[in-house]
Structure formats: structure tokens, C-alpha cells
Image (spheres, grey):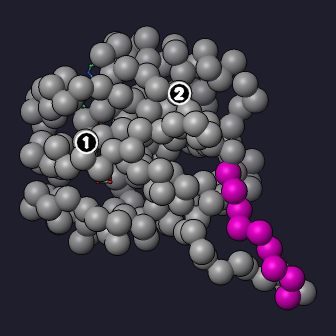
Amino acid sequence: MAAPGVLLVMGVSGSGKSTVGALLASQLGWKFYDADDYHSEENRMKMAKGIPLNDQDRIPWLCSLHDILVREVASGQQVVLACSALKKMYRDILIRGKEGAPLKRDESGKEEKPAELQLLVVHLSGSFEVISGRLLKRKGHFMPPELLQSQFDTLEPPSAPENFIQVSVEKNLAEIIATIMETLK
Ligand SMILES: Nc1ncnc2c1ncn2[C@@H]1O[C@H](COP(=O)(O)OP(=O)(O)O)[C@@H](O)[C@H]1O
Ligand SMILES: O=C(O)[C@H](O)[C@@H](O)[C@H](O)[C@H](O)COP(=O)(O)O
């Protein structure tokens, strides 16, 4: 497949996004962004208190990630982004920015189409049991394991016509990376 500008590694909390994303970026020589690093203090505190984020909390966060991706791709930089991106609408915002955002005007006043990114979605998919087992063992993270059920409730797995692959979290890391690298060939 033609290499996309952006590889989005998505899934519920504990599915392995940060681990797989960082490994992939280093193997590909692409820049790595972890969406967790871009949450507002309010969002972080909300999750730490065990309250799931809602659309209003997530939309500005996703818009700022979209802006980062557009900037990087415009400068020729390929990017791996680890981001929960649980709903189709969230992935659409990463690709196109906020739906209904007013069209920008160039210097002559002409309307410019919003930037759209070439993005491959890698969905790390697995059962509640396997993923909660990993979260319970993970130390020093702000996300409480009790929020996992809400992540599964919110999840809309990618489907056609989205450009995506699904990889089982039950594979070991080397197998996951190899599967993704094979798709990129
Ligand atoms: N394929 C895998 N096999 C075994 N353990 C994994 C795998 N992927 C991730 N882990 C472990 O599971 C935990 C959650 O992974 P992490 O990358 O933090 O997930 P996320 O970023 O999606 O929340 C970490 O302790 C990580 O080392
Ligand atoms: O959309 C969300 O609800 C959040 O992004 C949420 O998923 C959280 O930020 C992380 O998932 C926590 O961090 P981990 O994914 O690393 O557990």
C-alpha cells in the first residue's frame, strides 16, 4: 500500500497503543505522538477521578491533534499517533478537523478546503478480560482501570469505508509490529 502520512494506533485504554505506537515509530523512523500527552489538566483530573470523558471534553483535544498532524504532514514528516479515537466521529476529526468548521479563506479571500489527511487506522482489538488484566498490572498511570467498561461502551470499531486494519492484542508485540509493517509494504 502507498505509505500514509499518518498511522493512527487506536483502541481502548490498555490495548497497547502507546507501546505499539512508540515501537512502530522507532522502526519506521517516523515521529511519534502520544495523544495522552495533549489532554487538558481538566480532562486528566476528570479521568483520574474515575469520570469518563464525553464528546465536549474530547473534541477540542482531537482538533488540536488534527492541527499538529496537518502541520507535520505539510512539512513532509510522517507520523505515528497513539490515540484512543474510540468513535468514528473522533477519527473523522483527526482526519478532517471539526465537522462544520468554517472554511478558511486564503489571502485573496477565496475559500480553502479544510485539510484532509491520508491516514491508516490500526485498531488494537481485544477482550475486556485480557485488557483489564493488563491495566491492573500497569503502574503509575492516571487512567483508573474502572474506566475500562466505559471505553468499551463508547468504542465504535472502525469499519468500511474507513482505511483500517484490526490487530489482536493477544499477539505478542513482535507479531503486532510485523503485521502492521507487512500492511505498509
Ligand atoms: N501485545 C502485548 N502483549 C503483552 N502486553 C502488552 C501488549 N501490548 C501492551 N502490553 C502491556 O499492556 C499495558 C498497556 O499498554 P499501553 O501501551 O500502556 O496501552 P494504552 O496506551 O493503549 O493504554 C502495558 O503494561 C504494556 O506493557
Ligand atoms: O478518549 C479517552 O477517553 C481518553 O483518551 C482515554 O482513552 C485516555 O486518555 C487514555 O486512554 C488513558 O490513557 P491510556 O489509553 O494510555 O490508558
Is-magenta flag for residue 159?
A: no
Residue 93: give x, y in percent of width and height.
Answer: 53, 60
Q: Residue at x 73, y 79 (%)?
A: 104
Left/right placement of residue 41 relative to residue 106 reads left
Residue under numbered circle 2? 165
User: Which quadrant does the N terminus fall into?
Assistant: top right
**In the figure, residue 118 lies in which quadrant?**
top right
Q: Residue at x 60, y 27 (%)?
A: 28
Q: Is mark 2 within 8 Å of ligand 1?
A: no
Residue under numbered circle 1? 152
Sequence-earlier tag: 2 or 1: 1
Q: Is residue 147 visible?
A: yes
Left/right placement of residue 48 relative to residue 30 reads left
**Contact? badges 2 and 1 (CB < 8 Å):** no
**Amino acid beneath label 2:** Ile
Give the residues drawn in magenta, as a range.
109-117
Left/right placement of residue 10 relative to residue 108 reads left
Asked which secondary structure carries label 2, the reply is: strand
Q: Is residue 134 visible?
A: no
Residue 5: give x, y in percent of width and height.
Answer: 68, 42
Q: Residue at x 80, y 74 (%)?
A: 112
Between 150 and 46, the residue placed more toward the observer is 150
